[in-house]
Structures are given as C-alpha cells and as structure tokens.
Image (spheres, helix red, strand yellow):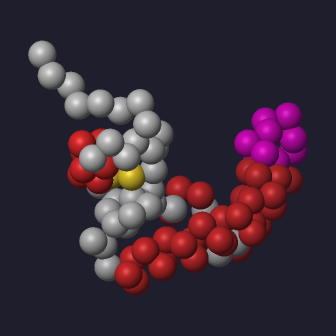
Amino acid sequence: MAKLSSINKNERRKKLVKQYAAKYAKLKAIANDTSRDETERLMARLKLAELPRNANPTRVRNRCATTGRPRGYYRKFGINRIELRQLGNAGMIPGLTKSSW
C-alpha cells in the first residue's frame, strides 16, 4: 500500500490538470503552430510557464485504484499486476482466466 500522502498528492494533481486542461491545450496549440509569428509563440510559451507545475498532465502518475501502487499498472483494468493476479484468481474480473498449458 502506497503512502496516503502520495495518493492524495496525485489526486490534487489530477484535479489541477482537469481545471487547467482547456487553457493548457489552447496555449500548447499556439506554441506549436509554426504558421504563427515567432513572438506570439514565445508569448504562449511564457504563459504556459506561468501555469502551476502540477497543471501539466505529465506530472500525474498512474496508480492502482485499490492500493495506490505506482508500478506495474495496467491501464485497461486500472490496477497493478499484483491486484490483477489476486482478483483474477478469485474470479472477480470478468473474462480473465488463469492460463494453463
């Protein structure tokens, strides 16, 4: 189980990313648009730098929904490999069976 503070910090980051998503996308599009004037692109980059650091989507860490473990995360299920195995063996995940040959 991950530290509760790490889990809460990640949740705050998710909230900030959602809050600034539209503004971030608009500024990012302006900054990457090569058809625009260089000064306009520079101003967009400076405004991007003024946004909170945690508003950047790359700072959000994928964590297991049950334990908060950051490693071995399966996006399809939203849990880590250990929980996937335990729940799969218990028959709690529909369509997932233990392989044997």
Query: Viewer-proximal residue, 31 or 4?
Result: 4
Is 37 colored magenta in this rendering?
A: yes
Q: Quadrant of residue 1?
A: bottom left
Q: Quadrant of residue 54?
A: bottom right
Quarter occupied by the C terminus: top left
Query: Viewer-proximal residue, 23 or 69?
Result: 69
Residue 80 drawn at (x, y percent) = 33, 52
Residue at the location (23% across, 31% down)? 98
Query: Viewer-proximal residue, 59 or 40?
Result: 59
Instruction: Examine the rendered structure and indicate whether residue 36 appears above or below residue 45.
Output: above
As drawn, is 92 to the left or to the right of 26? left
The range drawn in magenta is 29-38
As drawn, is 80 to the left or to the right of 45? left
Q: Residue furthest bottom?
A: 5
Q: Quadrant of residue 37?
A: top right
As drawn, is 28 to the left or to the right of 89? right
Residue at the location (24% across, 42% down)? 89
Residue 9 drawn at (x, y percent) = 48, 78
Residue 81 drawn at (x, y percent) = 28, 47
Q: Residue furthest left?
A: 101
Q: Would you say residue 85 is visible in this rendering?
A: yes
Q: Residue furthest top?
A: 101
Residue 93 drawn at (x, y percent) = 40, 42
Residue at the location (51% across, 62% down)? 60
Is 19 colored magenta in this rendering?
A: no
Instruction: Examine the rendered structure and indicate whether residue 30 appears above or below residue 33.
Output: below
As drawn, is 9 to the left or to the right of 40? left
Instruction: Examine the rendered structure and indicate whether residue 17 appears above or below residue 90.
Output: below
Residue at the location (43% across, 37% down)? 94
Q: Residue furthest front?
A: 91
Q: Would you say residue 73 is visible in this rendering?
A: no
